Amino acid sequence: LVAEIEKKVTEAFEVFDRESNKTVDVREIGCIIRSLGCFPNEAEVQELLAKIEVEEPGGFVHLEKFLPVMTEVLLDRRFRPIPEDVILHAFEALDENKCGYITKEDLVKHLTEE
Protein backbone atom coordinates (compact mmCIF):
# COMPACT_ATOMS: atom_id res chain seq x y z
CA LEU A 1 0.00 0.00 0.00
CA VAL A 2 2.79 2.43 0.90
CA ALA A 3 4.58 1.72 -2.39
CA GLU A 4 1.35 2.39 -4.32
CA ILE A 5 0.80 5.69 -2.49
CA GLU A 6 4.41 6.75 -3.02
CA LYS A 7 4.08 6.00 -6.74
CA LYS A 8 0.89 8.07 -6.93
CA VAL A 9 2.50 11.00 -5.06
CA THR A 10 5.63 10.84 -7.25
CA GLU A 11 3.54 10.83 -10.45
CA ALA A 12 1.52 13.85 -9.27
CA PHE A 13 4.72 15.66 -8.28
CA GLU A 14 6.34 14.96 -11.64
CA VAL A 15 3.46 16.64 -13.50
CA PHE A 16 4.56 19.93 -11.89
CA ASP A 17 8.31 19.23 -12.11
CA ARG A 18 8.82 21.27 -15.26
CA GLU A 19 12.60 20.92 -15.28
CA SER A 20 12.63 17.19 -14.43
CA ASN A 21 15.00 17.80 -11.52
CA LYS A 22 12.84 16.42 -8.69
CA THR A 23 11.83 19.91 -7.53
CA VAL A 24 8.73 22.07 -7.87
CA ASP A 25 7.97 25.66 -7.08
CA VAL A 26 6.54 25.93 -3.57
CA ARG A 27 3.49 27.70 -5.04
CA GLU A 28 2.54 24.44 -6.82
CA ILE A 29 2.25 22.36 -3.64
CA GLY A 30 -1.44 23.15 -3.02
CA CYS A 31 -2.28 22.06 -6.58
CA ILE A 32 -0.32 18.84 -6.20
CA ILE A 33 -2.01 18.02 -2.90
CA ARG A 34 -5.46 18.70 -4.36
CA SER A 35 -4.68 16.62 -7.46
CA LEU A 36 -4.20 13.71 -5.05
CA GLY A 37 -7.78 14.02 -3.79
CA CYS A 38 -7.00 15.97 -0.62
CA PHE A 39 -8.65 19.30 -0.05
CA PRO A 40 -6.88 21.28 2.67
CA ASN A 41 -7.54 24.97 3.14
CA GLU A 42 -4.66 27.40 2.64
CA ALA A 43 -3.75 27.41 6.34
CA GLU A 44 -3.49 23.60 6.27
CA VAL A 45 -1.30 23.78 3.13
CA GLN A 46 0.99 26.17 5.03
CA GLU A 47 1.11 23.70 7.97
CA LEU A 48 2.20 20.96 5.58
CA LEU A 49 4.82 23.25 4.05
CA ALA A 50 6.19 23.87 7.54
CA LYS A 51 6.87 20.11 7.77
CA ILE A 52 8.61 20.11 4.39
CA GLU A 53 12.02 21.71 4.13
CA VAL A 54 11.60 24.36 1.45
CA GLU A 55 14.82 25.26 -0.33
CA GLU A 56 15.62 28.95 -0.03
CA PRO A 57 16.07 31.16 -1.96
CA GLY A 58 13.58 30.57 -4.72
CA GLY A 59 11.13 28.48 -2.77
CA PHE A 60 11.58 25.02 -4.24
CA VAL A 61 10.35 21.76 -2.75
CA HIS A 62 12.31 18.55 -3.33
CA LEU A 63 10.44 15.32 -3.98
CA GLU A 64 12.46 13.54 -1.27
CA LYS A 65 11.13 16.02 1.34
CA PHE A 66 7.56 16.08 -0.03
CA LEU A 67 7.11 12.33 -0.48
CA PRO A 68 7.14 11.19 3.19
CA VAL A 69 4.91 14.05 4.36
CA MET A 70 2.33 13.51 1.60
CA THR A 71 2.44 9.72 1.98
CA GLU A 72 1.56 10.14 5.66
CA VAL A 73 -1.30 12.51 4.76
CA LEU A 74 -2.76 9.97 2.33
CA LEU A 75 -2.32 7.04 4.72
CA ASP A 76 -4.09 9.02 7.47
CA ARG A 77 -6.87 9.97 4.99
CA ARG A 78 -6.58 13.63 5.96
CA PHE A 79 -8.25 16.46 4.06
CA ARG A 80 -10.95 14.28 2.52
CA PRO A 81 -13.55 15.98 0.31
CA ILE A 82 -16.92 16.97 1.72
CA PRO A 83 -19.42 14.08 1.34
CA GLU A 84 -21.79 14.33 -1.63
CA ASP A 85 -24.93 14.39 0.53
CA VAL A 86 -23.65 17.48 2.37
CA ILE A 87 -22.92 19.25 -0.93
CA LEU A 88 -26.33 18.25 -2.29
CA HIS A 89 -28.04 19.60 0.83
CA ALA A 90 -26.17 22.91 0.44
CA PHE A 91 -27.15 23.08 -3.24
CA GLU A 92 -30.79 22.41 -2.39
CA ALA A 93 -30.70 25.23 0.16
CA LEU A 94 -29.49 27.62 -2.56
CA ASP A 95 -31.98 26.32 -5.15
CA GLU A 96 -34.88 28.26 -3.67
CA ASN A 97 -37.22 27.61 -6.64
CA LYS A 98 -36.46 23.86 -6.60
CA CYS A 99 -35.71 23.90 -10.33
CA GLY A 100 -32.53 21.77 -10.19
CA TYR A 101 -30.11 24.57 -11.02
CA ILE A 102 -28.79 27.85 -9.69
CA THR A 103 -28.43 30.84 -11.98
CA LYS A 104 -25.10 32.60 -12.15
CA GLU A 105 -26.72 35.73 -10.71
CA ASP A 106 -28.15 33.83 -7.74
CA LEU A 107 -24.84 32.11 -7.08
CA VAL A 108 -22.95 35.41 -7.19
CA LYS A 109 -25.53 36.92 -4.82
CA HIS A 110 -25.23 34.04 -2.35
CA LEU A 111 -21.43 34.04 -2.44
CA THR A 112 -21.00 37.80 -2.11
CA GLU A 113 -23.94 38.98 -0.05
CA GLU A 114 -25.01 36.17 2.22
Image: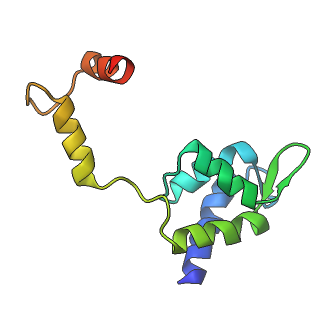
- Horizontally, residue 50 falls left or right of residue 94, namely right
**Furthest-front residue in this view:** 114
Q: Please state the horizontal and vertical placement of residue 31, each as a whole percent of the image.
A: 59, 47
- Horizontally, residue 3 falls left or right of residue 96, namely right
Judging depth in this view, the residue of 48 and 55 nearest the camera is 48
Where, by quadrant of the figure, is residue 13 drawn? bottom right
* Color scheme of the displayed model: rainbow
**Furthest-left residue in this view:** 98
Q: Please state the horizontal and vertical placement of residue 75, each as a whole percent of the image.
A: 53, 75
Figure check: 112 above or below 74: above
Residue under the point 22% across and 52% down: 85
Q: Quadrant of the C terminus?
A: top left
Figure check: 34 above or below 91: below
Residue under the point 74% across and 47% down: 26
What count of labels does the image hold?
Answer: 0
Judging depth in this view, the residue of 34 and 93 nearest the camera is 93
Residue under the point 48% across and 58% down: 79
- Horizontally, residue 39 falls left or right of residue 14, namely left
Q: Please state the horizontal and vertical placement of residue 54, each as a whole percent of the image.
A: 82, 54
Where, by quadrant of the figure, is residue 95 drawn? top left
Residue under the point 12% across and 34% down: 100
Figure check: 21 above or below 64: above
- Horizontally, residue 89 falls left or right of residue 45, namely left
Q: Please state the horizontal and vertical placement of residue 20, each as a whole percent of the image.
A: 78, 57
